[in-house]
Each structure stands twice: as structure tokens, then as C-alpha cells.
Image: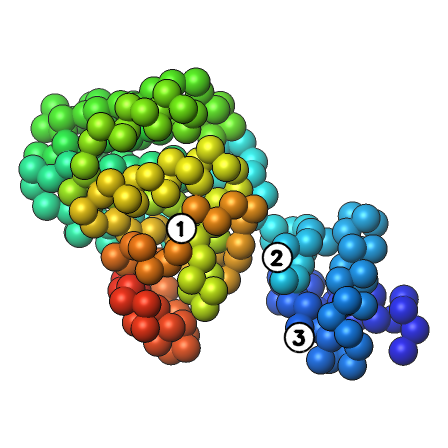
């Protein structure tokens, strides 16, 4: 098979599935992993895909960091379902942490109208604005140097402030959740360091992630999956993934 033909087939698979893995392509084309990595690097240089750990994703499907107002209007239904599950896990008078995540916005939209008394600690501006409208919520805000593209704070000052608290339950967003590799990842280091610290400080913690993020990996591994109590997603995962999570002592909680 000519190199150009192999590249075209790789792009066809990407168009169909949204992502590819090096090991799968190597087996399919009967070549070495290194040959596939070179193929993916060449295609990335041509702007036809985005390399990830162990494979690649299509330009259209990659979960790149975009402006907060663009991210919040995507996959709205999935985020709403996850938020509804998260709120059901909350109990009155708990100290709850909501980190920088568009799913946290969906959670805040529900809590804004809640009649229950919660204390909420957050470092996300939109969450602050929404929850400030509910007099039943005791609101704590962790500031610092703002990251405008992330709509919140995750710098050293922010970390120092948050480290004084011991939340009853924390709800954390993630760029990627790889259950098989026992890995939780973020796109940026500062945000990842903060997420890691919150997991350590909280009595219970949940990762909130759409099912499309299961199996993805970001640039910074901030924790292992077995450090959290559960993963909240909108739809059922495969039996294989549920079994893998169960072996790690982690619950998969779905809306469906």
C-alpha cells in the first residue's frame, strides 16, 4: 500500500469515528507503531488532524480550549443531564465546591432556583453570578488572577485560598477521563494542579464529564481515577468500562 493511500484511509477512519489509536492502525495496516506515529505527525503538519496521547482526533472533533462563551453552548443537553444528577447527590448544609467547568454552569442554573440551603465554594465567575441571586445559598468565592478564556481563577493565590477549606463534596470537570489507564487529565497545568488539590481536600469528590470525553487525554494528568468517588456522565458506558471502574472502586453514575 502506498503511503498516500494509507494516509487517505486514516483520514477516512477519522471522519467516521472522530479518533484513531496508533496500535489499532498499526494492526490494520500491518506496519509498526512508529510508522503510524510518523503518518499522524505528517498529517498533523498538514493541518488534517490533531495528535493526542496514543493516537489522534479529527480537527472537527478535538476538544480544544475555546472561549468560555463558545464552550457553554455546546452539548447543552448532556451537561444538563449531568448537572441534574450532581444536584441530587447534594445534601442541605453541605459545603460544596464547583470548579471551572461548563457543567458547573449547568449545576449553578439548577441551584439558582433551589430552596435548599447550601454553602458553595467556587472559582468560576459565571457560577458566582448565578448563585449570588439565591439568598438561601451561602456563597464563597476564590479569586486571584483571572483567566478570561476559562471564566475563572486557577493561579497561586486562588490555590492558597481554596486550601483553607475542606469541602464535603466537590464536583470537578475534566478534559479527559481514561478509566482503563486510571487517568484524569486537564488541558492546562494551573487548572490541573487546583483540581488535584481539591480532590485531596474534599471528603467526597465526583468528576463530571460528558461521555464524549471518556477515553480522551489532555496534556496534564492531575489525578488518577481511583482518587475520586465517582464519575457522573449523561449516558451509559460500556460494560467493559463499568467493570474497569468497579475494579478501581469508582462508581459510574449516569442520567440514563
Name the spot of residue 239 as percent of width and height, x first: 38, 78
From the viewer's perspective, is residue 40 above or below residue 169? below
Q: Earlier in the sequence, mark 3 or mark 1?
A: 3
Q: How much space separates mark 3 and mark 1, taking CA atoms?
A: 27 Å
Seen from the viewer's position, the closer of residues 20 and 227 is 227
> Which residue is under mark 1?
223
Name the spot of residue 180 as percent of width and height, x first: 45, 68
> Which residue is under mark 3?
24
Residue depicted at x 32% and y 67%: 248
Name the spot of residue 125 as percent of width and height, x first: 35, 25
Secondary structure beneath dot 1 equals strand
The image quarter in which residue 228 lies: bottom left
Q: Could you tell me if the residues under marks 3 and 1 are in contact, i.e. CB atoms within 8 Å?
A: no
The image quarter in which residue 191 lies: top left
Secondary structure beneath dot 3 equals helix
Q: Earlier in the sequence, mark 2 or mark 3?
A: 3
Residue depicted at x 53% and y 42%: 187
Residue depicted at x 43% and y 25%: 155
Q: How much space separates mark 2 and mark 3, taking CA atoms?
A: 14 Å
> Which residue is under mark 2?
53
Q: Earlier in the sequence, mark 1 or mark 2?
A: 2
From the viewer's perspective, is residue 28 above or below residue 144? below
Amino acid at each position: 500500500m502506498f503511503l498516500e493511500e494509507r494516509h487517505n484511509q486514516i483520514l477516512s477512519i477519522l471522519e467516521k469515528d472522530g479518533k484513531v489509536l496508533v496500535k489499532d492502525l498499526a494492526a490494520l495496516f500491518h506496519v509498526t507503531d512508529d510508522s503510524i506515529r510518523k503518518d499522524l505527525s505528517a498529517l498533523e503538519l498538514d493541518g488534517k488532524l490533531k495528535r493526542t496521547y496514543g493516537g489522534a482526533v479529527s480537527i472537527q472533533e478535538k476538544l480544544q480550549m475555546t472561549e468560555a462563551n463558545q464552550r457553554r453552548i455546546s452539548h447543552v443537553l448532556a451537561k444538563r443531564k449531568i448537572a441534574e444528577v450532581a444536584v441530587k447527590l447534594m445534601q442541605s448544609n453541605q459545603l460544596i465546591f464547583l470548579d471551572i467547568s461548563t457543567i458547573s454552569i449547568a449545576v449553578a442554573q439548577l441551584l439558582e432556583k433551589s430552596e435548599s440551603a447550601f454553602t458553595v465554594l467556587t472559582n468560576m465567575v459565571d457560577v458566582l453570578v448565578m448563585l449570588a441571586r439565591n439568598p438561601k445559598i451561602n456563597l464563597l468565592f476564590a479569586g486571584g488572577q483571572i483567566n478570561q478564556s476559562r471564566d475563572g481563577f486557577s493561579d497561586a493565590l486562588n490555590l492558597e485560598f481554596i486550601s483553607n477549606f475542606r469541602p464535603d463534596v466537590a464536583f470537578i470537570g475534566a478534559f479527559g477521563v481514561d478509566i482503563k489507564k486510571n487517568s484524569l487529565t486537564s488541558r492546562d497545568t494551573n487548572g490541573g494542579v487546583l483540581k488535584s488539590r481539591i480532590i485531596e481536600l474534599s471528603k467526597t469528590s465526583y468528576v463530571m464529564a460528558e461521555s464524549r470525553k471518556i477515553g480522551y487525554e489532555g496534556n496534564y494528568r492531575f489525578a488518577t481515577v481511583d482518587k475520586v468517588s465517582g464519575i457522573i456522565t449523561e449516558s451509559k458506558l460500556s460494560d467493559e468500562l463499568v467493570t474497569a471502574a468497579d475494579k478501581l472502586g469508582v462508581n459510574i453514575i449516569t442520567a440514563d
